[in-house]
């Protein structure tokens, strides 16, 4: 396998094929959450009393190994929400990130903010699952999908009432932005080399098509960076590790927000 992303995607296809045999799409559609009306992440990111932060629950990652194995979904996500997160991102990939669908379902049961299903989506079935477990938004990663797939999967999600965040890492991937993509995220981390280049977001910001909400992703660990990113046109900030790697992610989030607010009021 030539890189970790290719390895993850290959594993996803196997995983999804196995899960389809256990639960059909029809069964997923009968889940109680399936009929629930989704919350709009675009709206929540623009609420003046919220922070624009999409706070992520991430136990481990292929690049960092174990980040935090001691905290619970309830403890962390309710604090994120209480201190002004505009949305939550919950990893549901088990093998590489130590997440589960149950993590997202728990986050759903304790919080009234939009939730992003953070996973590697390669098949419609995973979008039906996302709806069935109570997610409001799905992630599509340009690096692992053809333009036609982005178009198809985003339309499929839209028809289920889900919003779509398309993640890009280079200018050429912006060609994959299509009608039913609501938010465009610039990942500062290269998913193949794991290198984080914080300038990536600012460089690509002006090239993101008008009408798509801009989200900066990964490697954000300083409240001052939020101010810079806002000036570059970003309205959403996806942050995981900076909070999760602390013993008390709730407190880390609260402190980050309080410093951020004082910088914004200058
Ligand atoms: O933990 P960080 O550096 O704050 O990054 C969060 C988020 O951007 C990152 O987890 C992420 C961005 N794109 C992904 C795709 C799959 C898995 C994870 C990710």
Image (spheres, rainbow, N blue to C red):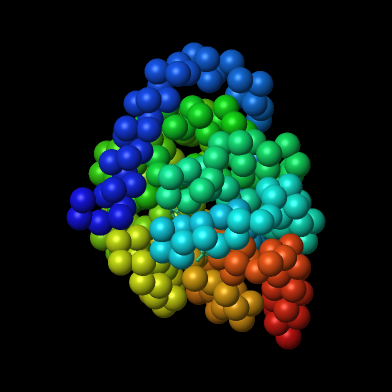
Q: Is residue 20 above or below residue 115?
A: above
Would you say 190 lies left or right of 55 here? left
Q: Nearer the viewer, residue 123 or 200?
A: 123
Q: Is residue 112 above or below residue 257?
A: above
Residue 95 placed where, x, y %? 43, 45
Residue 80, quarter of the rendered image: bottom right
Residue at image position (64%, 36%) is 105
Quarter that holds the C terminus: bottom right
Q: Nearer the viewer, residue 19 or 198?
A: 19
Residue at image position (46%, 58%) is 61
Q: Nearer the viewer, residue 135 or 5?
A: 5
| Numbered-mark total | 0
Residue most extreme to the left: 2
Q: Is residue 37 above or below residue 51?
A: above
Residue at image position (62%, 41%) is 103
Would you say 13 lies left or right of 61 here? left
Residue at image position (32%, 34%) is 13
Q: Is residue 128 visible?
A: yes
């Amino acid at each position: 396998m030539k890189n970790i992303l290719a390895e993850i995607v290959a594993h996803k296809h196997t995983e999804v094929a196995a899960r389809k045999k256990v639960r059909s799409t029809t069964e997923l559609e009968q889940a109680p959450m399936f009929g629930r009306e989704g919350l709009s992440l675009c709206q929540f990111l623009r609420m003046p009393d919220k922070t624009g932060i999409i706070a992520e629950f991430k136990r481990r990652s292929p690049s960092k190994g174990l980040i935090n194995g001691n905290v619970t979904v309830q403890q962390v996500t309710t604090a994120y929400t209480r201190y002004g997160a505009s949305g939550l991102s919950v990893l549901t990939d088990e093998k590489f990130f130590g997440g589960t669908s149950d993590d997202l379902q728990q986050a759903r049961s304790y919080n009234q903010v939009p939730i992003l299903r953070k996973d590697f989506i390669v098949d419609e079935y995973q979008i039906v699952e996302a709806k069935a477990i109570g997610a409001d938004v799905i992630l599509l990663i340009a690096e692992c999908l053809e333009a036609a797939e982005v178009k198809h999967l985003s339309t499929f999600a839209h028809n289920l009432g889900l919003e779509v965040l398309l993640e890009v890492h280079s200018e050429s991937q912006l060609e994959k932005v299509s009608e039913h993509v609501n938010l465009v995220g610039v990942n500062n981390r290269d998913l193949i080399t794991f290198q984080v280049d914080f300038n990536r977001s600012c460089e690509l910001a002006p090239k993101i098509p008008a009408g798509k909400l801009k989200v900066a992703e990964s490697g954000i660990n300083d409240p001052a960076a939020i101010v810079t990113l806002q000036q570059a046109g970003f309205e959403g900030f996806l942050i995981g590790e900076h909070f999760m790697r602390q013993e008390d992610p709730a407190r880390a989030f609260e402190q980050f927000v309080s410093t951020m607010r004082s910088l914004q009021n200058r």
